[in-house]
């Protein structure tokens, strides 16, 4: 794909022979359709359907800087791209635009596309070596022990707003819980958690302090790695260092950064969207209260309808090939359209039909690069939401659904707030408080059970210009843990709570 000087909204565009050119027109000037900007970001689902109607399973698009790429829209085509690394590699160094020097040094696509020494950017034997270390480490976590961390931090967060009767469930709950838990799984000191929450949020938003925030994240991890080399523990950092795959220092650090940031961002979105669905969608509230649907079912439905990442870059063609009826050239980049694939009429002719228990969505990918930490993300989201709904049993949205706002970028769409109201904790009926206390006692005071507990250590200084608050744990002691209530035999959280209240 080579550029020529063609006018399109003031910038250069590929010539008609390039995959990014839109055959048959459709734009006012018969030009291109960009994957960013108001049209693409305001209504991603409508944007994808517009592309599908015109191009079918695979559509030519433009990224920032008018860089051409293919957006995979079909469910089957996505699976093919995910499962055949011999045709579609994860090595971004193959990208023609990189090789021909057309990617600007400050391009917003670089943070997620630039090659890194992690399992996400390699294939074959090297991929197996690196990924084995990551999956072996993640699989060592005991789910029950991990849920105790979720319980502890959920209780701490709820305690901060529980007596007010009102809260923003995104900014006061969903945006904090995943990082607080992940720092413990990585073996980081607890005081790192609140600071890393702010740094990670700043980094993902791409603000002017994003570089400083990224440096803070890396420095926090580097100090943790140094400490764990001297004082090993039952945590992911130690397990990566000691793994037989023999990861070097850079590989350990880069994988920890990838795991921390990816788990945080995806789980924030999963918690936010699931809470929104439970509080606004009458179908789901009815199913939950009627005992026909569990929280895992709700999570699966959200992963179908609102996956944490709408699209995932990328795959690069190893040679001239074909996908979805399109001629793909060696070095072309493919973007995996996760949200579009999940809505493909070929697999979901009726989007309103519930998909309880169906985990064949594309949200976590498929093939050799399928998300290795998906069960951890699900466990944090499921347990955290269940604790929240149990502690605040009359939780409800405090604004009209149409007032909710999302912010979007070319990869994802984030709910900016979820204002809710509820009976303050201090005003709950005695029977409700007793039920919560009984649940707390059942959890036990232990925090381990297979998950290492970090020891205190000085946190690195906050980078200049970055918004990094002081540690949350320094101003109040943790509350007793309350166990997540995962309803047995497909009973909903509401029916479970009511059964306890009735004795």
Image: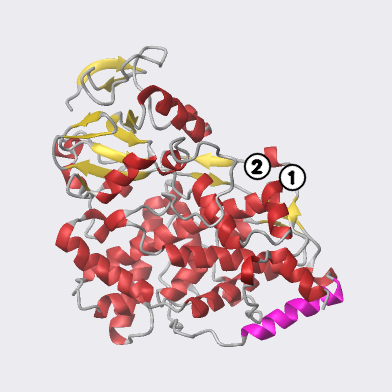
- In the picture, residue 99 is in which quadrant? top left
Q: Is residue 474 visible?
A: yes
The tag on residue 208 is: none
The tag on residue 404 is: 2
Q: Position of residue 51 (x, y in %)?
A: 41, 27
Quadrant containing the C terminus in the rendered view = bottom right
Quadrant containing the N terminus in the rendered view = top left
Q: Nearer the viewer, residue 209 or 492?
A: 492
Measured along the vertical axis of the image, is residue 45 above or below residue 285? above
Q: Position of residue 186 (x, y in %)?
A: 40, 74
Cα separation, mark 1 vs mark 2, equals 8 Å
- Marks 1/2 in contact by CB < 8 Å: the verdict is yes
Residue for point 71% across, 47% down: 282
Q: How is the image coloured?
A: secondary structure
Q: Position of residue 138 (x, y in %)?
A: 37, 72
The tag earlier along the polypeptide, 1 or 2, is 1
């Amino acid at each position: 794909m080579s550029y020529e000087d063609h006018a399109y909204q003031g910038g250069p565009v590929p010539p008609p022979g390039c995959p990014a050119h839109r055959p048959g027109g459709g734009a006012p000037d018969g030009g291109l359709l960009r994957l960013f900007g108001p049209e693409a970001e305001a209504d991603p689902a409508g944007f994808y359907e517009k592309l599908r109607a015109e191009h079918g399973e695979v559509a030519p698009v433009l990224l920032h800087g008018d860089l051409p790429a293919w957006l995979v829209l079909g469910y089957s085509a996505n699976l093919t791209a995910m499962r055949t690394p011999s045709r579609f590699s994860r090595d971004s160094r193959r990208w023609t635009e990189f090789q021909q020097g057309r990617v600007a040094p400050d391009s917003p696509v670089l943070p997620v596309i630039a090659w890194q020494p992690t399992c996400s950017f390699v294939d074959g034997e090297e991929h197996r070596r690196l990924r084995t270390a990551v999956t072996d480490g993640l699989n060592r976590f005991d789910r029950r022990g991990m849920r105790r961390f979720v319980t502890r931090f959920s209780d701490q967060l709820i305690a901060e707003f529980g007596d007010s009767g009102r809260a923003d469930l995104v900014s006061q709950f969903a945006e904090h819980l995943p990082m607080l838990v992940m720092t413990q799984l990585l073996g980081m000191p607890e005081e790192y958690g609140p600071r890393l929450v702010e740094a990670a949020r700043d980094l993902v938003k791409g603000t002017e302090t994003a570089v400083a925030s990224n440096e803070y994240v890396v420095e926090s991890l580097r100090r943790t790695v140094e400490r764990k080399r001297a004082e090993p523990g039952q945590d992911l950092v130690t397990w990566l260092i000691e793994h037989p795959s023999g990861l070097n220092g850079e590989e350990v650090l880069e994988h920890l950064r990838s795991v921390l940031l990816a788990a945080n961002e995806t789980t924030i979105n999963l918690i936010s969207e699931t809470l929104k669905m439970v509080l606004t969608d009458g179908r789901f509230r009815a199913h939950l209260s009627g005992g026909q649907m569990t929280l895992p079912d709700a999570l699966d439905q959200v992963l179908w309808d609102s996956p944490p990442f709408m699209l995932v870059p990328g795959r690069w063609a190893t040679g001239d090939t074909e996908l979805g009826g399109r001629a793909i050239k060696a070095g072309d980049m493919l973007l995996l359209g996760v949200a579009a694939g999940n809505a493909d009429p070929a697999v979901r002719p009726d989007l309103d039909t519930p998909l309880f228990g169906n985990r064949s969505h594309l949200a976590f990918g498929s093939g050799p690069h399928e998300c290795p930490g998906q069960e951890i993300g699900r466990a944090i989201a499921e347990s955290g939401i269940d604790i929240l709904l149990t502690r605040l049993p009359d939780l409800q949205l405090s604004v009209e659904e149409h007032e909710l706002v999302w912010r979007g970028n070319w990869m994802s769409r984030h709910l900016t707030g979820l204002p809710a109201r509820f009976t303050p904790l201090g005003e709950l009926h005695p029977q409700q408080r007793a039920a919560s206390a009984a649940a707390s006692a059942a959890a036990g005071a232990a925090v381990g059970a297979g998950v290492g507990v970090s020891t205190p250590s000085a946190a690195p200084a906050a980078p200049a210009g970055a918004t990094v608050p002081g540690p949350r744990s320094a101003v109040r002691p943790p509350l007793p843990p309350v166990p997540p209530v995962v309803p047995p035999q497909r009973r909903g959280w509401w029916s479970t709570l009511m059964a306890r209240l009735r004795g």
